[in-house]
């Protein structure tokens, strides 16, 4: 470790000579973090290499470090499974539509609640925010959705998620932290509330809205409980739910495998022949891949969201 | 802004706000309110209206029969929870599970703090960033995927069992998932795997916000690295830790059901069934909608009381509320 680095980082002893205890601590500390990071990442790597490896080797547990006998037929075949394509569209649809509407609603409401002139502004703001702290419970929610005709209806994924009190707080706080002179100038020029919102406030809020968008997209993509409770129509299953079924219902999976197998098999075909485990792993990879891709790109937004959340939490 | 002092004639908002009559201001104020109405309707439909569903706890509601034709039973379900021995036994076990899981969560709540301190002791910035990225990743996958990972690694044909069998350490696969041994501990490990890295981010930010002069003063006093951690870093992070602790106390009954639902099976049901999962199993699994509503109603009421208590305690001790 160079001296300059030691001086740069915070909370570091100026003693260039490290004590023995500190050195021992350093070794264990670094070893711990390498081990923990490995435990966090290896399972995903394991799923990926097994989903592209020779299926007989994979089933025998021979693929642990590098893929062997690489082939892509698992991915080709898995999309022929009944329901998987539909589930992918449902998951994608709810993620895109849900996140877009949540972002727009959070931005619009966050903005409206900064407008001092609103009729009983404080009351309506609290009316929305207080819903963070109570919950009718699972069964009353189920009965409500049933009464509203939202069971077995795609919109049950979207409508209840549009107004998110927490996101509204984030946006409102953000808007209050930026100078209002621009908005006032626009109003002097005769801009109405909506014009001010779309032309001025929305572009200025991009950083916080990116955070809201990322969190709500990940939430939509990962959501599982709503399918479980509100959906019996398999056309509306999300990928998460389908994956759960593939893991738990060995019988339905076995028949799906059989259906995809078709005719007779020889040894060469066996290597690329789907097994229940190959299907599970391939679907798992399809479900996790979007997260693996966007996560490193948007990590700073996640972190920022966490910080803002902690401040207001 | 100074525009407030100058009478402006042509502007809409300027007119309503500054020199327009009461009626103009009122109109603008109502217009702003009207814009929120679609959203208020959503809030009423999905947050307030479902509360009416609590009346189902006072009826003997059997789904195809509408509520109007169901029998009103008053507090029968609530009485049943405490009077029926079999029911009481089950609910007792569910409460024990809930308390143990939440208790373990609170007991390990300082882990993220130590994680952050340890990570901060690593000097290489790139290495630190990579570790942070990799360890926060599991937080962003769903519990279904965690279960898929668990299944691939720990089922009887999973990687760990095959590895152990291949090196002849075991002859029979170990039942990691389909057994009831150490269920609490396993659930704790999975939630730590998923949440530890993410939980530490808050404390890492806290550490970077500590005044460097505090460390310099400690160094002048001859404090070594460990003493600096104990006497500067930990006390500086305490307020953040206490807030997080209070939040987890107020959520004592809310374990959520996703984790326990995906991991539950016939073997571990006894110890994995926390309140949220129990409500689901009773309501959707056994179709006892009224009983499930009664249980979740009690749970909600206790949770709200807990929240107020914790908030009150926070105001008393820190002079700041958490909600």
Image: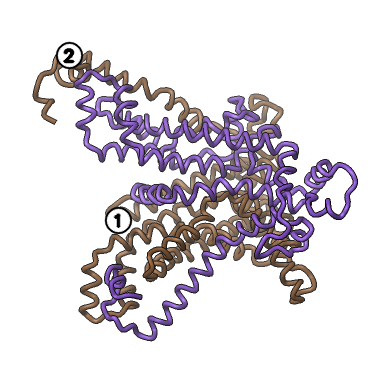
On the rendered structure, is A70 left or right of B115? right
**Spatial CA span between label 1 and label 2:** 52 Å
Q: Position of residue A184 (x, y in %)?
A: 20, 27
Query: Which of the two labelled residues, at mark 1 and mark 2, occupies the earlier sequence position?
Result: 2
Residue closest to the eye, A205 or B198: A205
Residue that carries the numbered disc 2 in the rendered image: B10
Quadrant of the image occupied by residue B85 = bottom right
Mark 1 touches mark 2? (CB < 8 Å): no
Asked if residue A3 lies left or right of residue B309, the reply is: left
Q: Which residue is mark 1?
A: B316
What is the count of numbered marks? 2
Give the SS element for disc 2: loop
Q: Secondary structure at mark 1?
A: helix
Which residue is nearer to you in this view: B233 or A253?
A253
Q: Which chain is purple?
A: A
Q: Which chain is brown?
A: B
Q: Residue at x 54, y 52 (%)?
A: B255
Left or right relative to A27: residue B193: right
Disc 1: which chain? Answer: B
């Amino acid at each position: 470790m160079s001296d300059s680095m030691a001086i740069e980082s915070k909370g570091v002893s100026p003693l260039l000579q490290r004590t023995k205890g500190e050195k021992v601590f350093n070794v264990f500390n670094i070893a711990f973090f390498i081990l923990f990071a490995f435990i966090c990442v290896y399972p995903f790597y394991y799923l990926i290499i097994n989903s592209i490896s020779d299926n007989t080797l994979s089933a025998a547990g021979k693929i642990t470090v590098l893929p062997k006998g690489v082939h892509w037929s698992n991915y080709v075949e898995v999309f022929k499974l009944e329901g998987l394509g539909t589930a992918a569209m449902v998951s994608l649809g709810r993620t895109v539509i849900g996140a877009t509407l949540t972002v727009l609603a959070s931005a619009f409401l966050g903005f409206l609640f900064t407008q001092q002139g609103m009729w009983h502004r404080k009351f309506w703001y609290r009316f929305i925010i207080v819903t963070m702290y109570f919950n009718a419970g699972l069964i009353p929610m189920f009965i409500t959705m049933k009464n509203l005709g939202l069971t077995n209806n795609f919109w049950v994924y979207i409508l209840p998620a549009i107004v998110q009190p927490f996101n509204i707080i984030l946006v409102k706080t953000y808007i209050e932290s930026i100078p209002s002179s621009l908005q006032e100038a626009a109003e002097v020029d005769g801009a109405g509330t909506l014009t001010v919102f779309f032309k001025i406030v929305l572009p200025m809020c991009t950083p916080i809205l990116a955070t809201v968008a990322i969190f709500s997209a990940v939430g939509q993509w990962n959501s599982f409980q709503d399918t479980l409770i509100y959906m019996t129509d398999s056309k509306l299953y999300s990928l998460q739910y389908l994956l759960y079924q593939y893991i738990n219902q060995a019988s339905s999976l076995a028949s799906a495998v059989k259906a995809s197998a078709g005719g007779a098999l020889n040894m060469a075909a066996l290597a690329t022949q789907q097994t229940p485990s190959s299907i599970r792993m391939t679907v798992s990879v399809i479900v996790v891949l979007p997260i693996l891709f966007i996560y490193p790109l948007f990590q700073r937004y996640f972190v920022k969201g966490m910080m803002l959340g902690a401040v207001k939490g | 802004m100074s525009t407030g002092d100058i009478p402006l004639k042509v502007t809409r908002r300027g007119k309503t706000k500054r020199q327009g009559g009461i009626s103009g201001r009122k109109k603008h104020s109502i217009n702003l309110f009207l814009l929120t109405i679609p959203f208020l309707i959503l809030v009423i439909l999905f947050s307030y209206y479902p509360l009416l569903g609590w009346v189902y706890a006072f009826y003997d509601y059997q789904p195809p029969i509408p509520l109007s034709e169901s029998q009103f039973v008053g507090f029968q379900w609530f009485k049943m929870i405490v009077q029926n021995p079999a029911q009481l036994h089950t609910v007792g076990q569910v409460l024990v599970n809930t308390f143990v899981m939440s208790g373990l969560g609170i007991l390990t709540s300082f882990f993220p703090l130590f994680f952050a301190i340890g990570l901060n002791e690593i000097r290489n910035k790139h290495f630190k960033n990579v570790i942070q990225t990799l360890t926060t990743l599991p937080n962003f996958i769903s519990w279904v995927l965690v279960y898929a990972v668990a299944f691939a690694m720990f089922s009887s044909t999973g990687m760990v069992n095959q590895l152990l069998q291949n090196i002849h350490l075991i002859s029979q696969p170990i039942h990691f998932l389909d057994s009831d041994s150490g269920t609490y501990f396993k659930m704790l490990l999975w939630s730590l795997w998923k949440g530890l890295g993410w939980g530490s981010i808050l404390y890492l930010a806290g550490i970077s916000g500590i005044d460097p002069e505090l460390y310099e003063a400690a160094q002048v006093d001859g404090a070594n690295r460990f003493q600096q951690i104990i006497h500067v870093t930990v006390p500086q992070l305490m307020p953040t830790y206490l807030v997080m602790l209070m939040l987890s106390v107020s959520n004592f009954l809310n374990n959520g059901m996703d984790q326990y639902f995906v991991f539950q099976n016939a073997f571990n049901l006894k110890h994995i069934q926390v309140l949220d999962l129990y409500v689901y199993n009773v309501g959707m699994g056994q179709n006892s909608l009224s009983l499930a509503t009664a249980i979740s109603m009690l749970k909600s009421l206790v949770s709200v009381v807990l929240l107020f208590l914790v908030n009150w305690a926070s105001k008393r001790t820190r002079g700041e509320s958490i909600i």
